[in-house]
Image (cartoon, rainbow, N blue to C red):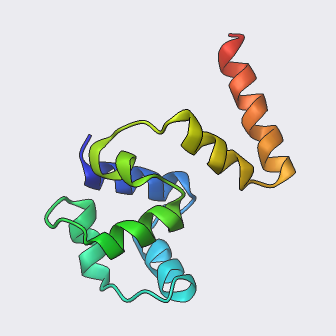
Amino acid sequence: MTPGNRLRRARTLNDFSKRTDFYQYLANNHYFEMEYSRLGRLERDEDDPTVEEVAVLCSALNMTADWYLMGAFPTKASLTQRIESLTLPQVEQVYLFIDAIRFR
């Protein structure tokens, strides 16, 4: 899987089925200027992202830069940090999901 594939997958997993919706979200919430066509080029792997773009995209889509750029899975420490930033109902969902996988 390429960085563009991972970006597109993270976008859809975050309920942005349309690129235009995600672009609008970025424009409204991240004080970040990016042309819509640039986002498309990143998703198609036609361009490499800048450091600033990586930071904003990873923050907006709740993914690590290692996973976005290289497909590396997060460490236990980074997973713990991400879980600590969730609300209690979200943490409960994470644990339910983990239990569903573990006890199949």
The vertical placement of 10 against 41, above or below, is: above
Q: Between residue 30 and residue 28, name the one nearer to us.
A: 30
* Residue at 85% in and 48% down: 89
- Seen at 25% across and 79% down, the residue is 37
Above or below residue 78? Residue 29 is: below
Expressed as whole percent of the image width and height from the top left, the position of residue 50 reads 25, 72
**What residue is rendered at 29% in x and 51% in y?**
69
Residue furthest to the left in view is 46
Q: Nearer the viewer, residue 58 or 35?
A: 58
Q: Quadrant of residue 20?
A: bottom left
Residue at the spot 86% in from the left edge and 49% down from the top edge: 88
Residue 32 position, x and y percent, is 43, 86
Quadrant of the frame with the N terminus: top left
Q: Is residue 50 above or below residue 58?
A: below
On screen, residue 43 above or below 67: below
Q: Position of residue 87 (x, y in %)?
A: 81, 55
For the C terminus, the image quarter is top right
